[in-house]
Amino acid sequence: MTAFGLYQHQPISCPSSVTGDAGIFFLTLINTLFANQCQLGSKEDYPVDAATTLVDNDVFDFIVIGAGTSGSIVAAELANKSNSRVLLLEAGGYPSPTSDIPAFHLGLQRTIEDWQFHTETSNNSCLGFKNSRCLIPSGRCLGGTSTINSMLYLRGSKHVYNSWLEEGNIGWSYPDIFPYFKKSEKLEVHELLTSKLYGTEGFLPLTRSRLHQPVRNTILNSAKELGYKVYNHESQIGFFETLQTINKGVRQNTAKVFLGEYKTLPNLKIATESLVEKILIDRDLKEATGVKVNIGGKTITLYAEKEVIVSAGTINSPKLLMLSGIGPKEHLGSLGIETFHDIEVGKNLQDHLMFPIFTIKVNDSALKYLTQNPTEELYKYFANREGILSTTGLNNLIGMLSTKNHSTDPDIKIGYTFIHREDSYTLTQYKRIFNFDDSIFKSLGKANKFSHLLLVHITLLDTKSRGRVLLKSKSPHEKPLLESGYLSEDDDVETLLKGIRMVEKQVNTKSFRQISATEVHLDIPSCRSYKFKSDDYWKCAIRNVATTGYHLIGTCKMGLSIDPHAVVDPLLKVHGIRKLRVIDASVVPTTTTGSLGAVAMMIGQKGSELIMNGFDGIKH
């Protein structure tokens, strides 16, 4: 049974009363379980919310906008290494108890902890989803997307970072940024400690889980049959189990880890449920002076004497810059927004595009045991933070592949999800988070009625297509327009097709035949005229059900001033505006092959040091 399946309705019967020593033991057990449950999502893990203490015209040294994956690190580092007054503003609230439970990470999408963005309709992509729109999750709470993601920690290919240097971004080659990855890391995998590949003195626990089921060995043995190496650590090409940001069965988001470490610092303030409406710009000096922020329905003005730092994410950072008059003049003018600096904010949007439901039917030999006792699993977790709820199953077993036979640069990543027979709950979750058309969902349900399913997620890493973020209106309370650009370049379709063919070869290995692996024909209405497994069928399927790989970057691109698409320089300062930086994944110029969480943390660490290097009186 999957983790989601644990929460299917179960008959419950309770004794009318408990008495004697046994009754005392029973009540002690219940109290212990309740106490352990209350430790999840505890506000005590974070700084106290100071939102109600802020008043109009308050002054700080630094104002950081967004307590997400990068912003939490920036604020924590600035407050710890200086006497500067640091204010961190977050539009969302404190993370829920559910967010702390690793197995329920998918269930956080489309909740209050998610901004719930979606793409605009397109003729090229997302055609098989309701309203022809892909849903784009993004964290809206302390910790941002590090609070709702799958907790994978993957740095990615060195060569991508070196290409940033080749574009003129001095200080961003892999040797330059390697120390900033390590600065966050606290490796807790014993067999890797002597490798010196990861940091051991940071605050972020890095652990690794392993699904002890035959299907895991089937995947790895099939990889070996195909000539791939299997590693016990991250590799450029090959199969391995990634590290995860889980500690003792609990998610470790960046707000909990980094802000929590410095939660008692008197010079650090955080304010939740605080939506920044606009960055204030001094027209004569061309510099940021503060922000207008809505707290509890009231808009107040706050000032920053040193800098304003935007860490609102790949979608909201360009939105906020444009609302503040920094962006394409023609677009801003069409909405009646005064332009302070005409610059290509919102362009260069990139994402890892994922084909999420290449589906394989397998038999019972893929498992050592067919079901788990839901009550037992709940007890394991709430009593000891153990069992299936403390992991993400097969989620961290991945393969990094190259369709071009490169030995160092993968362009396809494959991952896996196992769904037990007749697990309608998990399939319903997939339908909910991806917004599948009913007929596509129906074909998955039909296959699951009689067979276990192995879903293979095939992700394009080297995306050629580009999209953009635009304002829908001048209202800060309205979501921006997200033109994904998915599959606007035919090369992306061809590479994903090659990725599908590589997975088909895996299905045809001896290892997979031993579990009776059979591909499932997805009933995609607009693809019915094509023969199943033909190139035309798969290309049609790609345009219908390929969706976000959750790694959006590039809308505030880092680059030199001579680059017409660059928004920030290598110091992460916004071109043309003083005292304003962007420090989050939006500055990434080209997609990496890693997980965006790891990259965003590195950017937060390096960005905070860049700030500190620019001011006197800050400890180094």
Image: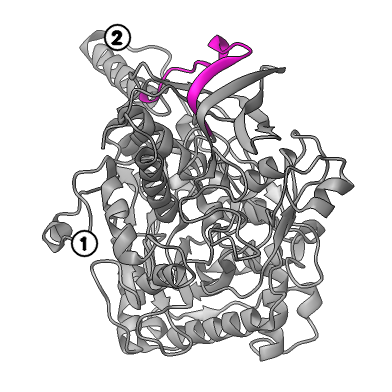
Figure check: 281 above or below 274 = below
Provide the secondary structure element on which disc 1 rests: loop
In-front residue for pair 53/374: 53
| Mark 1 neighbour density, 10 Å: few (under 14) some (14–19) many (20 or more) | few
Provide the secondary structure element on which disc 2 rests: loop
Instruction: Tell me if residue 206 can be seen.
Output: no
Residue 512 covered by magenta stretch: no
The amino acid sitting under disc 2 is Thr
Residue 59 covered by magenta stretch: yes
Label 2 sits on residue: 19
Figure check: 388 above or below 220 = above
Residue 306 coordinates in the image, percent (x, y): 49, 30
| Mark 2 neighbour density, 10 Å: few (under 14) some (14–19) many (20 or more) | few
* Residue at image location 36% in from the left, 25% down from the top: 45
| Left or right for 16, reference 244 | right
Instruction: Tell me if residue 177 can be seen.
Output: yes
Residue 158 coordinates in the image, percent (x, y): 35, 70
In-front residue for pair 159/141: 159
Q: Gap in Å between the C-alphas at discs 2 and 1?
A: 56 Å
Figure check: 592 above or below 411 = above
Image quarter hosting the C terminus:
top left
Residue 514 coordinates in the image, percent (x, y): 37, 82
Figure check: 261 above or below 601 = above
| Upstream in sequence: badge 2 or badge 1 | 2
* Residue at image location 34% in from the left, 39% down from the top: 376
Q: Quadrant of residue 155?
A: bottom left
Q: Which residues are magenta?
A: 45-64
Which numbered circle lies on residue 197?
1
Residue 563 coordinates in the image, percent (x, y): 60, 66
- Cβ–Cβ below 8 Å for labels 2 and 1? no
In this rendering, the count of numbered labels is 2
In-front residue for pair 386/457: 457
